[in-house]
Image (spheres, coloured by chain):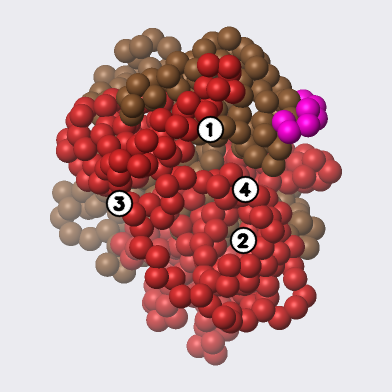
Amino acid sequence: MSRKSERLVNLTIALLATKRYLTKSEIFRSVDGYEGSAETKERMFERDKDDLRNLGIEIEVGSFDPLFDDEPGYRIRPESYSLNLSDISGEDLALLSLAAEAWRGAALDDAAQSALLRLSSIGVMADIDALPAMTPRLSSSHIGFQTLSASITSRIPVTFDYIATELSIETRVVDPYGIATRNGHWYLVGFDHKREGIRIFRFDRIDGDISKYSKGKEFNIPENFDLDGELNGTSLLTNSTLDLRKGKAHILRNMATESADKGEWDRVKISYPDTERMIKLVLWHGQDVKVVSEDSLRSGVIEALKNLVTLHG
Amino acid sequence: MAKVVNSPLSRAARMLDLVPYLHTHQGIELRALAQNFGVSESEMSADLTNLWMCGLPGYTPLELIDLSFESGYVTITNADTLAHPRSLNKEEVVALLLGLDLVKSALSNEREDLINNIDSLSRRLRELIDLQGFLSAKPESDGSIRAIISSAINNGHAVEIEYHSLYADRVTQRVILPMKWDQDEFHEYVFAYCDSAKSFRTFRLDRITHCSRVDRELLPHNIEAVDKVPDDYVIRIHHHLRAARELFELSGEDKDLYPGIEKKISSFTQEWISRMIFSAATSVELISPKNARLDIVASAKSVLALYGL
């Protein structure tokens, strides 16, 4: 086992140190660890190249003279191998540490920690004292997160089974435009091929694995795409006026843009993207909320209340 | 530390990362090095021994990496080819970008300096992998509240919190002694001794709206025995099965849920059940107990009365 890891390190060093392309025969002759028949060495080398590429190391293939059909050669350009984030200050490193720490125990924990280890090899001390005391945290244990993060970087459509409102399973094909987290939930926002529009998917409603869509073509994200706008529904907000009983309905108070004292009640103005959800939120608060306007919210609440009486009466 | 898988590939990756790390941490203690890389000391010694056999083609002492670690302190020479840290892969960049966006959201607007730094770092990280996709993370709870509670758990001191109880729709002030973090798939909780309730309680972190340290000693005392058992309720799910499953946290397979199914659920408070039935907006019906069902009717009528109906 250690022979293979040593060989990979030696191959990396040899390909990094060379100023010209090294041919396979030169590699087999000079790099320690390539043994056995020509076929065995060939197989070893192919696997080693794949392994290094899986580590994110770019191996360049070229030939000595493009005019002749020479044996191809290989090398790793130091500028593509090395981390280049320009100047990193102690404060930057502290911010990156906090960013990596937010993943502790969550889906991309390993990736975040290995990134941090490399950043701390730059030779800068993290200036933790420059930051306010805070420990924000991300939650996610969903399988498929890695696939999705890979897809969003490679612009390849993904496919997955999605649990619909009545628990039926629908297979979706989506161009992933963005990943976001709000209130402990993770969302994928992207172009749904079948519905021909942008849709939002909650990760925990994805049934099983997310995989790359084999028939998919590379896609481009429209320039006017606005991830936060899609999630907040800011393009189509409805405004309403509600009366909230004093000392109650704290969730709605937090959403209020204006508030006026009306004795036993406070009159507030709120904006929201989804009337159906707002009806449920108003209903949750029972006798502590009354809708003054707008009409569809008011009539939706009244209708639901009448149905509740009929259903349980 | 991150979970370590000891495949030859992960070991090679670790060896490649060890070289630049040692270059900037010459003389680091072997124990600290192992800890920082999330491996045992013996695994780290094995990695260093293997690395010692590596170097430029030729593999004479002139070309081999030179390491010294017998004394328990590690130094490295003759490894200039690998002295620069490896670039980050796509997954690592995505992880850092989401983490940075979370930190940015948690910072107050007054720290414009740090926000500008995060924007600059994010731009450079995106360029590293030519990222086109969008990433956005908003914290579920205030990062500074979490820091105060973490410090309280570590140091055993009490905190005063303002807590929004969702089912009672009431905000209360409490002095609590935080003991440990708990979490489920979506949320984080603080398990604590609550001086106000004289009992142990679990608080959902995002419902703690204010938190400050209390400088008096608090030890659990006069703990009230909790012998209350939850009451059983039966609900019938008419439609919106997914929403009902999530709202009532129903376990079991999806195929076991169908329109019209009746399910038994438990709750310590009828108020909670009543709010859930209201917010389900007739997709879920409360079947029993009968008095709770009649209460739903009475409550709905009293809300309708607010509208003059």
Q: Give me the residue at 17% from left, 53% from top.
A: A40
Tell me where residue A309 appears, x and y as whole percent.
Answer: 39, 24
Q: Nearer the viewer, residue A165 or A206?
A: A165
Q: Where does label 2 land, which residue?
A: A121
Q: Residue A237 is drawn in which quadrant?
A: top right
Q: Disc 3 designates what residue?
A: B232
Q: Bin the neighbour count of mark 2 within 10 Å (Cα to Cα): few under 14, some 14-19, many 20 and up.
A: many
Q: Which residues lie in the magenta part? A: A257-265
Point out residue B153 in the picture as x, y percentages from the top left corner.
60, 72
Q: Colour of chain B?
A: red
Between the residue at mark 2 and the residue at mark 1, the CA separation in whole angstroms equals: 58 Å
Seen from the viewer's position, the closer of residues A34 and B163 is B163
Q: Which chain is brown?
A: A
Q: In front: B220, or B111?
A: B220
Q: CA distance from mark 3 to mark 4?
A: 24 Å
Kind of residue sitting beneath label 1: Gly
Asked whether the viewer can see residue A129, the reply is yes
Mark nearest the camera among 2 and 4 is 4
Mark 1 belongs to which subunit?
A
Please, which chain is the residue tagged with disc 3 on? B
Q: Which mark is residue A286?
A: 1
The type of residue carrying mark 2 is Ser
- Mark whose residue sits in front, 3 or 2: 3
User: Viewer-nearest of labels 1 and 4?
Assistant: 1
Up/down of A187 relative to B168, above or below: above
Tell me the residue that label 4 is attached to: B170
